[in-house]
């Protein structure tokens, strides 16, 4: 995942840059391939770095989780495999019954428990209208063995009509994959599981993609690309943050950054205002436009990951070739900067 723009600013304010920088995998060389795995052309890592700028980090999700955990482990109580079972609240606080049989009384409940949030369901309701299905599946998993034929520090990407397959060689136990594809019935596809579904969707491809599919298991991350849309991010003394509140999907390329930025802004609002209701209202007003912008960018960005036609694939390849030109590279950098402001 990438942390740049306001996301980078947030981890800097939180004092996490040194720990995250030690885990930064940097930019890698991207090799565009055809269906057989043969190279079409290469985009050097320096091109991506020049386009994004120096205030950016590329890290594994697990490394981000580790850094955040280590930052608070000695300060707050952390319970694993525990979810809210029931939530009640009054004007003075909120009571939470947990799945381990205990109860907690608090001033504020923050639900940051993902797109299928239990907190969301308990307090905001389990309304299907809160979810916007983008009709695409997304999968990712790590590779026990680096893919043969890809130099370390590089990755191959196949982009075809309605689908993308990427395989990255970042060394032993650090190599990973990313898949996305168009799907009209995401619920049925999800039920198939990643091993069957990915084999059916990408089994015709060769090269590193075929090697990766040989290692997929049903423990891989596999889900529908779904946005969460709410008419408000808090109800009384319960507030949602991150994917549980506004999931933008991977197509925005900004989910983790927005979650961290949103959480940091929430903390600032609570410190700045004298009471919780005022703080939550101010925070939501401040963050709302950014959420709407990122979700809209994701919906428009789907076609980059899963082009609707072969003509769109060719146009995308032309743009990737053009980005290597210094003048075009500067235009892309300014475009990214505008999106982050």
Image: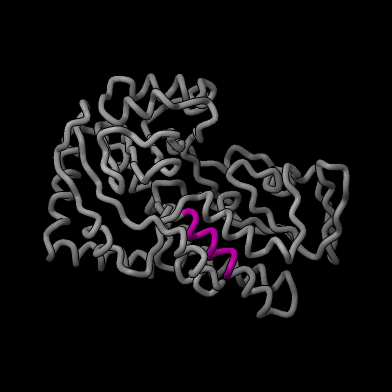
Q: Is residue 294 above or below residue 146?
A: below
| Residue 287, x across and y down, in percent | 53, 66
Which color scheme did the rendering employ for the protein? one colour
Q: Main secondary structure of the magenta part?
A: helix
Which is nearer the eye, 63 or 257? 63
- Give residue 152's quadrant in the image: top left
Q: Is residue 107 left or right of residue 192?
A: right
- Give whichever of 301, 148 is nearer the camera: 148
Residue shown at 69%/73% (left/top)? 278
Residue at the image point whose x is 30% and y is 48% from the top: 153
Q: Position of residue 79 (x, y in %)?
A: 76, 50
Q: Residue at x 58, y 68 (%)?
A: 264
Q: Nearer the viewer, residue 147 or 8?
A: 147
Find residue 241 and report its horizontal and vertical position in percent: 61, 57
Question: In the rendered image, which quarter is residue 73 located in?
Answer: bottom right
Give the extent of the magenta segment: 255-264
- Residue 260 in the magenta stretch? The answer is yes
Q: Is residue 295 left or right of residue 319?
A: right
Residue 157 in the image: state x and y as whole percent: 27, 39
Q: Is residue 89 left or right of residue 191?
A: right
Q: Is residue 12 magenta?
A: no
Quadrant for the C terminus in the image: bottom left
Task: In the rendered view, tell whether residue 187 sits above or below residue 59.
Answer: above
**Vertical position of residue 214 compared to residue 181: above or below:** above
Residue at (64, 48) in percent of width and height:
113
């Amino acid at each position: 995942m990438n942390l740049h723009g306001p996301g980078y600013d947030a981890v800097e304010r939180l004092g996490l840059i040194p720990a995250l920088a030690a885990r930064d995998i940097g930019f890698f060389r991207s090799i565009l391939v055809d269906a057989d795995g043969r190279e079409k052309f290469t985009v050097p890592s320096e091109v991506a770095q020049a386009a994004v700028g120096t205030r950016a980090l590329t890290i594994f999700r697990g490394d981000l989780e580790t850094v955040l955990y280590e930052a608070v482990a000695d300060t707050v109580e952390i319970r694993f495999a525990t979810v809210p079972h029931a939530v009640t609240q009054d004007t003075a606080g909120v009571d939470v019954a947990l799945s381990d049989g205990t109860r907690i009384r608090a001033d504020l409940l923050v639900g940051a428990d993902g797109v299928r949030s239990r907190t969301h369901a308990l307090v905001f309701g389990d309304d299907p209208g809160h979810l916007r299905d983008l009709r695409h599946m997304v999968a990712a998993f790590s590779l026990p063995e680096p893919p043969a034929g890809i130099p370390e520090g590089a990755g191959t990407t196949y982009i075809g009509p309605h689908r993308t397959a990427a395989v990255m060689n970042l060394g032993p136990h650090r190599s990973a994959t990313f898949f996305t594809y168009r799907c009209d019935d995401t619920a049925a596809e999800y039920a198939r599981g990643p091993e069957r579904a990915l084999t059916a969707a990408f089994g015709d491809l060769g090269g590193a993609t075929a090697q990766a599919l040989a290692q997929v298991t049903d423990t891989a991350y596999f889900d529908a690309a779904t946005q969460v849309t709410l008419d408000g991010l808090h109800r009384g003394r319960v507030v949602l943050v991150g994917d549980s509140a506004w999931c933008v999907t991977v197509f925005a390329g900004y989910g983790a950054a927005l979650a961290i930025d949103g959480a940091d802004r929430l903390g600032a609002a609570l410190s700045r205002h004298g009471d919780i209701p005022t703080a939550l209202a101010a925070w939501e007003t401040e963050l709302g436009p950014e959420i709407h912008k990122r979700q809209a960018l994701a919906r428009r960005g789907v076609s980059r990951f899963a082009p609707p036609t072969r003509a769109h694939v060719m146009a995308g390849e032309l743009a990737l070739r053009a980005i290597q030109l210094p003048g075009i590279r500067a235009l892309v950098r300014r475009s990214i900067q505008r999106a982050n402001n």
